[in-house]
Image: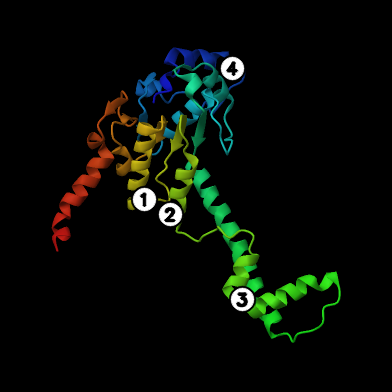
Amino acid sequence: MVFLKRFRLLTENQEYDMILGMKNIHNNVYPLKIFPEKEFEVIDFEPITIFYGGNGSGKTTLLNIIGDTLRASKRNIDKKTEFFDDYVVNCGYDFVHQGDCKGIKYISSDDVFDYLLDLKAINSGVNRRKEDLVKEYYEYKNTPSQNFNSLEQYEDLKNKVDSNRMTVSKYVRTRLRNNTIVQESNGETALDFWQNEIEDNALYIIDEPENSLSAENQLKLKTFIEESARFYNCQFIIATHSPFLLALNEAKIYDLDSVPVKSKKWTELENVKVYNEFFKEHSDEFKE
């Protein structure tokens, strides 16, 4: 599905007029003077569109411009320069099937890290509670039986009975309110994040989703994105330099390292060629 069909960045003349219109002198004119130098003004989109380039190529800037222009929902609000909001106001775009789009969401790699940290904190709390319950179990089990004569002592009586008839693991499990938190690797948890985050009929603007994912899990994410675009009417705009994600089927890839910016096949990208040459040089080592 294509919701965002075309996006128009500011021309060099528009940026010049914006600078002239400012009353004060600014040392930082971000995000100006990035894309005119790349001769990049109009972006046409497919169900999966990728921005590729090295550090400083403008990938994340481009995602932020598109996300802010479309008023995409965000977990974290970035601090922008004075020029950024004015830049966004002057961008143009063509949006189709608007009634079918359930949402527009911007997701950064920081969102994934925050999710991992939150889950780690929850797991730590659950583990501390487990330790307390194990200690409680043995205290009740080893304490001699006594008469319980009031409602206030009911909980003690129940715990005493349970400690005598249950194993320690069952005693702990029945008392943990949150019994669903599991300890997984960061990669597995990050993959779960993406699978829970992506819903049907929506536009997703994603910055470097490969972070925290192993090669195997990047391939799983690749398949998940392809199926979401093909079967669940999702559109993806992704910034990445992962060779696994650059190989997404039928993705349109813009090489932000080239001037002018061009659409290329993933096998034509410089970073992918480096990987290819490296494995060619070491191909004999895989024949053992």
Q: Residue at label 4? A: 22
Mark 2–mark 1 Cα distance, whole angstroms, equals 7 Å
Of label 3 and label 1, which has the lower sequence position?
3
Q: Residue at x 54, y 49 (%)?
A: 115
Dot 2 falls on a residue whose secondary structure is helix
Q: Residue at label 2? A: 188
Name the disc covering residue 166, or none.
Answer: 3
Q: Is residue 158 left or right of residue 17?
A: right
Residue 39, percent from left and from top: 35, 20
Q: Amino acid at mark 1?
A: Asn
Of label 4 and label 1, which has the lower sequence position?
4
Mark 3–mark 2 Cα distance, whole angstroms, equals 33 Å
Mark 4–mark 3 Cα distance, whole angstroms, equals 74 Å
Q: Are marks 2 and 1 in contact (CB under 8 Å)?
A: yes
Of label 2 and label 1, which has the lower sequence position?
2
Dot 4 falls on a residue whose secondary structure is loop
